Image: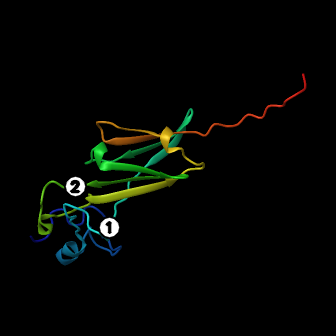
């Protein structure tokens, strides 16, 4: 396809950390482009989900913007104090690798595990996925046991 019209404007270093534009040559660009297949394959790279984790009242809240998926494409798993968000983003357009000037979006399976400071009861977790494609997981804080002094009556 020739040199990209965007050549050099995205970064002072290419993805290999070498000086130059985003890609230092068309050959490097072709070598570094990744196109995900329609269905994930074993051993395929797994993307990572960005999350915000914060406390609000009686909950720990995990927010994750995950564009390009539906709630039915997302699995939330709990193993003791580790919560894992997994899913897959499917690319609907079949675009040949040599047609891309730049491909930064990740298509395919993704996962993110978060270790929390307490054991999680999976029955108490709630999750929502809004129209802006933001997953919100609400995890109730553990109930603290109050120490009560018992006296004779």
- Mark 2 — residue? 90
Q: Residues within 10 Å of mark 1 (few under 14, many from 20)?
A: some
Q: Relative to the observer, which residue lies in front, 101 or 51?
A: 51
45 or 40, which is in the foreground? 40
Q: Residues within 10 Å of mark 2 (few under 14, many from 20)?
A: some
Q: Position of residue 153 (x, y in %)?
A: 90, 21
Residue 79 image offset from top left, x and y in percent: 50, 54
Residue ID at (88%, 27%): 151
| Quadrant position of the N terminus in the picture | bottom left
Residue 106 appears in the picture as rendered:
no
Q: Is residue 138 left or right of residue 24?
A: right
Residue at figure coordinates x 10%, y 71% from the top left:
2
Distance from Cα at disc 2 to Cα at disc 1: 14 Å
Q: Position of residue 143 (x, y in %)?
A: 63, 37
- Which residue lies under the disc numbered 1? 45
Q: Earlier in the sequence, mark 2 or mark 1?
A: 1
**Percent position of residue 42, x then y:** 30, 69
């Amino acid at each position: 396809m020739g040199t990209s019209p965007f050549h050099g404007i995205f970064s002072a270093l290419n993805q290999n950390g070498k000086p130059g534009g985003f890609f230092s040559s068309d050959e490097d660009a072709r070598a570094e482009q990744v196109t995900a297949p329609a269905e994930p394959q074993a051993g395929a790279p797994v993307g990572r989900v960005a999350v915000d984790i914060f406390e609000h009242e009686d909950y720990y809240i995990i927010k994750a913007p995950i564009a390009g998926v539906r709630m039915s494409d997302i699995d939330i798993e709990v193993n003791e104090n580790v919560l894992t968000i997994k899913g897959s983003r499917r690319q609907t357009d079949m675009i040949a690798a040599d047609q891309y000037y730049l491909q930064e979006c990740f298509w395919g399976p993704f996962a993110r595990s978060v270790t929390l400071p307490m054991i999680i009861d999976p029955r108490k977790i709630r999750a929502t996925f809004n129209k802006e494609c933001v997953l919100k997981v609400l995890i109730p804080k553990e109930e603290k046991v109050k120490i009560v002094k018992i006296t004779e009556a």
